[in-house]
Amino acid sequence: MTYPEPLLIDDDNGHRGIDVADRQEMLESQLAALFEVSSVLSRSLMLSQTLTEVLELLHQHGRLSKGMVSLVDRETGELLVSALHEDGVAPFESVRYRPGEGIIGRILERNRPWVVPRVADEPRFLDKLGVYEPNLPFIGVPIRIGEEGPVGVFAAQPPACETQLHQRARFLEMVANLIGQAVRLARMVEDERRELREERDKLRRVVRGKHGFDSIIGHTDQMKLIFDQVRQVAKWNTTVLIRGESGTGKELVADAIHYNSPRARNHFLKLNCAALPDNLLESELFGHEKGAFTGASTQRKGRFEQADGGTLFLDEIGDISPAFQAKLLRVLQEGEFERVGGSRTLKVDVRIIAATNRDLETEVRAGDFREDLYYRLNVMPIFMPSLRDRIEDVPELARFLVHKIAKMQSRELRVTDSALRVLMRHSWPGNVRELENCLERAAVMSEQGIIDRDVINLAGLDVGTTDQDLMAPSIASPSVDLDDPNLDERERVIAALEEAGWVQAKAARLLNMTPRQIAYRIQTLNIRVRQF
Ligand SMILES: Nc1ncnc2c1ncn2[C@@H]1O[C@H](COP(=O)(O)OP(=O)(O)OP(=O)(O)O)[C@@H](O)[C@H]1O
Ligand SMILES: [Mg+2]
């Protein structure tokens, strides 16, 4: 590296008149000071703190006063004062120098040291900080990182009797090099940290999008109620019990509650209670100490500990044994437990969301589920409607799921209106999961990527389970004779709506009605309508 020759305004004495012993002593004390400076700088990455310590050290051992480090703000290019040694500590945070401004700005712009034998004699001296001693010399040097342009300026005032100012300037340059390395490291860490933070925030947004309300489909009143409940309950730490048949979206709702809660940034752990026998369940949830049982070769934290500050989702809670129910009750009541094989009581702050498809009330009555635990869990119940009770959501759900499947299969998929009508006639005992599986099968079978009614039928939709109550059996065929005397009024209107793709105006024409008349019929015959 080539340094530009320091711009030195030589002092009157030069260094010729100096005594060899004095010179030796000065070099030794500078070396000692450099050593101290480097160890202070390597101690921590808290830059403003270590820089302040360095300035203090130079003041005490190096007889340098008013030490100042200013660094270039990477956004504005201006010099900001990062550390200042001044007993009265002036508020320096607002002081900034543009490149070329005053002595400090010029040092930065020219990338060269500057020595002023006496501050009072230098008209370009701005003294924005208002701390400099007018009768003392002043030395400023650029802070460099490798070959890059300067990243800041380091300046200080040596004592008045100083005879070897250029020698001092050399010393300040060495300190500035050490500072430069510390700045480089701190900036590297800062950059890395910022990148990680940005990455984390991006991932958080993705996760939130995936588990937010947008991933729960439904516009029926039943689902609107669910959305309201989720929104309300997410804000608090209340225990939530999600009820509903298999495949109704209980886990989806648990996700939405956690990721929309103040705990969203903390852990969300899930455990299927039905999947494990009691002893494993216990060590899974509460953890175990080393040697607690055969195979417990190390200590292990349980889900409760891991979820501290976050949320724990206990799925299939209705399936746990009475013995385990008692253990769970304690942690729900007191937030306390011990690891298996341990005696220390641990306390955690965990929000519980539980889910079950069992009829807990009947189980309580039969003595299979502890009543006290039931009340502990059932603080805020959410009942997921079964799909057959919100059949109007099927088209939107089907489109959403087909889109999801298309993404998975990386191709375009489309579901036709006639397929949707077939899907709406099914009673879906397996709820949304069954719908999802059926569409996935259909997707696999549709080479062209078009899922129409034939593919759905081929995909093995059990037409035998068609909900007779909801849809008249006679409209199962594509073109229904609307004049069929066997059709009652409700069936006739539904058939026409079917035929018209649920476009009311079109159905009205088929029935020789006005749109107003059909709207009235739909209302009085209690037909749930879906537009698609
Ligand atoms: N309202 C919905 N919108 C979109 N997808 C849904 C909806 N409800 C359920 N699903 C999807 O259906 C599948 C089953 O949902 P989920 O696992 O949440 O059901 P569950 O009630 O927990 O079922 P089980 O009791 O069998 O565990 C999942 O793939 C889920 O993404
Ligand atoms: Mg589930």
Image (cartoon, rainbow, N blue to C red):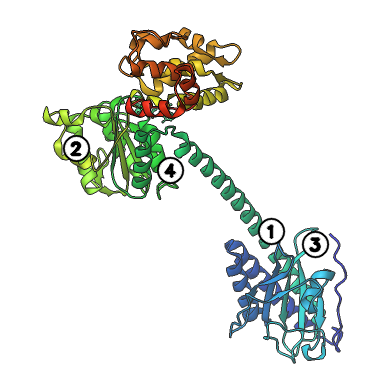
Identified at 56% across, 22% down, the residue is: 406
Neighbour class for label 3 at 10 Å: few (<14), some, many (≥20)?
Answer: some
Location of residue 142 in the rendering, given as x and y in whole percent from the top left corner: 77, 70
471 and 283: which is toward the camera = 471
192 and 3: which is toward the camera = 192
SS at mark 1 in the image: helix
Q: Which residue is mark 3?
A: 149
Q: Who comes first in sequence, dot 3 or dot 2? A: 3
156 left or right of 223 in image: right
Which amino acid, by three-letter code, is at mark 4?
Tyr
Q: Which residue is mark 2?
A: 374
Neighbour class for label 4 at 10 Å: few (<14), some, many (≥20)?
Answer: many
User: How far apart are the two marked residues, 2 and 4, measured between alpha carbons?
Assistant: 25 Å
User: How far apart are the two marked residues, 1 and 4, measured between alpha carbons?
Assistant: 38 Å
Q: Who comes first in sequence, dot 2 or dot 1? A: 1
Q: Is the Cβ of the residue at disc 3 closer than 8 Å to that at disc 4?
A: no
Q: Who comes first in sequence, dot 3 or dot 4? A: 3
Which amino acid, by three-letter code, is at mark 1?
Arg
220 and 95: which is toward the camera = 220
User: How far apart are the two marked residues, 1 and 3, measured between alpha carbons?
Assistant: 13 Å
Against 301, is 278 above or below?
A: above
Q: Who comes first in sequence, dot 2 or dot 4? A: 4
Q: Is residue 437 visible?
A: no
Location of residue 446 in the rendering, given as x and y in whole percent from the top left corner: 56, 12
